[in-house]
Structures are given as structure tokens and as C-alpha cells.
Amino acid sequence: MTEPPVLTIDGPSGSGKGTVAARVAEKLGWHVLDSGALYRLTALAARRAGVDFADHAAVAEIARKLPVRFEGGKVFLDGEDVSLAIRTETAGNDASKVAAIPEVRAALLDWQRGYARQPGLVADGRDMGTKVFPDAPVKIFLDASAEERARRRYKQLKEKGIDVNLAGLIAEIEERDRRDRNRSVAPLVPADDALIIDSTAMNVDEVVDLVLRAVRKALPDVGKGQ
Ligand code: C5P
């Protein structure tokens, strides 16, 4: 059986990866891996268990045994719906702290690779193209200015009924960027063979279009015979 094709979409927080990944996957009929959710869940589970993020071995143990279930677009941790709880800015910041722990990244590696299934996978994260799926035939690095990303996040959170302040959000996004780009393991960098898209002045449809074009160029047979 041939390997399932993988499209990786990496980039900083708020660059629109999640939305673009979901839309592209829907168009192609492919599966989606939201790898950030795994780091968010690990951090939440560690907090709830009272585990200090400085205790790397204990946090990694939690990552290895996450009692998680994805169902109907929702995420359950130990049977509890945590779909909203993992989307707060605190949860995102906590995620970026546990994501800097090498043992946690190692614990989640095979699990993430297991998401590659036919007819294909869209994998969204920070190191999908560099570490998790280095042989992926199509790699995208989606970027946008910090201000624009904060504005998008602000709108997204407001729509979900989560109250935030824009200036605080810009500061948090910049801090998270710094942590993600400067960590020693799997730092946020584009893969050498990634197509870099700056979406600052683009809407979602335009980005989705560019990504689909890149997929069809690399994989001319995709979608044929469906
Ligand atoms: O993408 P999202 O904002 O949900 O990711 C939350 C955090 O998880 C990121 O700031 C990053 O530190 C971490 N992460 C990662 N590698 C991934 C996905 C997310 O380090 N593949």
C-alpha cells in the first residue's frame, strides 16, 4: 500500500493555519491533524493533575497517556468536553511552555505520525514539515504580521464569547512567537522546501486557493477518480 500523502501547514499562532487546514482538507476529502491541540491538552492535563511544568519527566508521562477522545468536532479529556477550555490564551501559552520540553515532543511524535491515513492528511502545527513529516510532498509555511494575527485572534475569541483585550493579545502573541522560534527543540522555522505564504493582506479564500494549487502541482493525481 502506498504511503498516504501529507500536506503540512506550519506557522506562528494566529496565522490562519487552523482555518486553512480545515478548508483545504474539506475540499480534498482528507483527514486533519491539529497538532497544537495535543500540546494544549497536555498542558491542561498537567495543570489539572497539579504537575509542575518544570518536572519534564512527569509532563511527558502525561503526554504519553493522555485520556483524550475527539468526537463530532469536540475534544474530551477524561470524558469532559474541554473544546473551549483548550482554546483560551492561557491554554495556548501553557501549551507553548510544555512544547519546549524535548521529552514531551518525543512522546507525541509517533502519535502524530499515526494520523497519516488514506486518502491523505493535512497536518497543522509548528514542526509538521521539519520534524514530524519531513518527507511530506507539499509543505506550506503560513505567516502574517503579529498585529494582523492578534486582530484575527481577537475576532475569533470574541465570536466564541471569550473576552480579551487587543493590546494584551499582541503582547502575548509576540511572547509566544519568541518562545516558539527560539526554543532548542523543533523551533518554528520554515522547512527548506516549504512554500512561504504571507497572508497579512490576503483573505482565507485566497490562501486556500494558493495551497490547493500547490497540492495539485505536487500531486497531479489528487482528486482524480473521486
Ligand atoms: O497551534 P496552537 O496555537 O494550537 O499551538 C499551541 C502551542 O503549541 C504553540 O504555541 C506551540 O508552542 C505548540 N506547538 C508546537 N508544535 C506543534 C503545534 C503546536 O510546539 N506542532
Image (tube, rainbow, N blue to C red):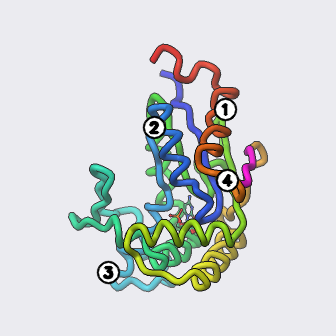
Q: Residue 49 got which mark?
A: 3
Q: Nearer the viewer, mark 3 or mark 2?
A: 2
The CA span between labels 4 and 2 is: 18 Å
Helix, strand or loop status at disc 1: helix
The three-letter code of the residue at mark 4 reads Leu
What number of labels is visible? 4
Highlighted magenta segment, given as a residue range: 194-198
The CA span between labels 1 and 3 is: 45 Å
The CA span between labels 1 and 4 is: 15 Å
Q: Residue 213 got which mark?
A: 1
Helix, strand or loop status at disc 2: helix
The three-letter code of the residue at mark 3 reads Ala
**Is tag 4's residue or tag 3's residue first in the polypeptide sequence?**
3
- Residue identifier under label 4: 142
- Residue identifier under label 2: 26
* Residue 135 visible in image: no
- Position of residue 25 measured from the top left corner of the image (x, y, whole percent): 49, 39
Kindly identify the residue that appears in the image at 65 percent across and 70 percent down.
180
CB-based contact (under 8 Å), mark 1 and mark 4: no
Helix, strand or loop status at disc 4: strand
**Is tag 1's residue or tag 3's residue first in the polypeptide sequence?**
3
The three-letter code of the residue at mark 1 reads Arg
- Position of residue 91 measured from the top left corner of the image (x, y, whole percent): 45, 75
